[in-house]
Image (spheres, grey):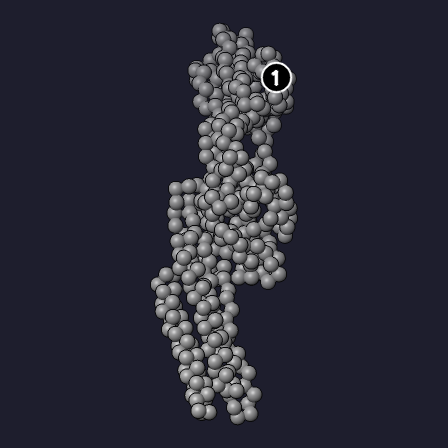
Amino acid sequence: MTISSSLNAGVAGLAANASKLATISDNIANSSTYGYKRAVTDFHSMVIDSGLGSYSAGGVRATTQRLIDERGPLVSTENATDLAVRGRGMLPVSDSSAISAGGDLPFKLASTGSFRPDADGFLTTSSGLTLMGWAANPDGTVPTYPRDTTGGLEPVQINSNQFVGNATTEVDLAVNLPATETQAGASGATQDLSVEYFDNLGKSESLSITFNPTVPGSGASNEWTMVVEDSASGGAVVGEYTLTFDDTRGQGGRLLSVASVSGGPYDPANGTVQVGANGGPIDIDIGTLGDPGGLTQLSDSFAPVSISKNGSPVGNMTSVEVDPNGNVRASFDNGMSRLIYKVPLADVPNPNGLQTQDNQSYTVTPDSGSFFLWDAGDGPTGDVVSFAREESATDVAGELTQLIQTQRAYSSNAKVIQTVDEMLQETTNIKR
């Protein structure tokens, strides 16, 4: 009966607008929730008209959807590990409760989070989401992991009491030797130089370098013997080299030849000699042949112009930051910075098909498609912004406008039910 279908349509309208009111209420309630994605309700008409002259109202049904691909504005914060994704892609996270239980780690996604170290050093939000990433090797390189699986992902753990030291492997010398000491009648005084280096455990050791001039009976020899002793080896000689300098016009004072007496041979291409220190080989750069830098023999003064080296002593971790490519770097009080984790960004073909979980996290479903882990800034993904959070995607003004419209629509459907009731009452009264 047509009048009955009108009643059913009114009831369906009440239910549909109640669903829309629920999404509007949720959006307004989460207008200050970081990372919240707005939910929307769409109406779809139900057509059951037979087309035989009478019309039956089919009513309406409502479907809801969360717009996960809709991003809120970014806001700056004071915490270096407050992270947000600028562009496509999401941060891989897991439940801190699963980590403490030692079981399988559920794979979840989040677009933002305020991560801080917990009691065990895991970067975790106050709601219990722990940041996941690939651990770097001690040398700062990241192994190659599969990109279509969670294999290799582990909770990002920051040990604030972590120490680091870097062994010295290279020393650069720029020293001037006095030309007057290789002339006949010179005193033959040796020139001493001490160079600090750091061993494999970060301890300070030293290379004692002695330059002994060759004093001829007449003329000038332009020759020196360089002897390198290692304090970590008890003062043992780890390298001895005969240095000859050029005295021709235009090339005067520059290295002419280097002969190895002991220790590693001289590399003319790189201008280095390699000495076997106690903790491992160290390359000493004395300059290439004919190079005005490195070792020279000019004038009458001994002058260590420049001495530099790599390596560092043991240092304490002072801070952690995440760069736009998702690299988690730890800084130490000895000036070092080391890559300790790399956080990829996960992307799926249909972000709106993800299953919504608590605390603004999401899980992969067949509707979303399978995920792929990209390096931040590569492929379709955006970059990672530290010192930032993503605000709610809710537009309060727009939601209030829809609230008014929904209220009016709900009242109109209620009026339809009231009118149908009155008409049915009139039909009942015909019998009186």
Q: Nearer the viewer, residue 198 or 290?
A: 198
Q: Quadrant of residue 354?
A: bottom right
Q: Amino acid at mark 1?
A: Val
Asked whether residue 260 appears in the rendered view, the answer is: no
Tag count? 1
**Residue at 48% from the left image edge and 46% from the top image edge:** 127
- Residue 418, percent from left and from top: 41, 79
The residue that appears at 53% across and 9% down in the rendered structure is: 215
Along the line of sight, the residue nearer the viewer: 170 or 174: 170
Which residue does the image show at 59% across and 28% down from the upper left? 268
Label 1: element kind? strand
Residue 384 x, y percent position in the rendering: 48, 48
Q: Residue 271: x and y, percent?
A: 56, 28
Q: Which residue is mark 1?
A: 238
Relative horizontal placement of residue 279, taking residue 322 as reference (left or right): right
Mark 1 Cα shell of 10 Å, populated few (<14), some (14-19), many (≥20): many
**Is 146 situated above or below 285?**
below
Q: Position of residue 346 (x, y in %)?
A: 56, 52
Quadrant of the rendered image containing residue 280? top right
Taking depth in this image into account, of 71 and 45 the one nearest to the observer is 45
Q: Please state which of residues 414 and 93 is positioned toward the viewer in this rendering.
A: 414
Report whether residue 41 is seen.
Answer: yes
Farthest residue, direction front: 432
Q: Residue at x 40, y 78 (%)?
A: 415
Q: Above or below — where is 207 with respect to 361?
A: above
Q: In the picture, which quadrant includes the C terminus?
A: bottom left
Q: Is residue 330 above or below residue 224?
A: below
- Residue 424, compared with residue 248, is above or below; it is below
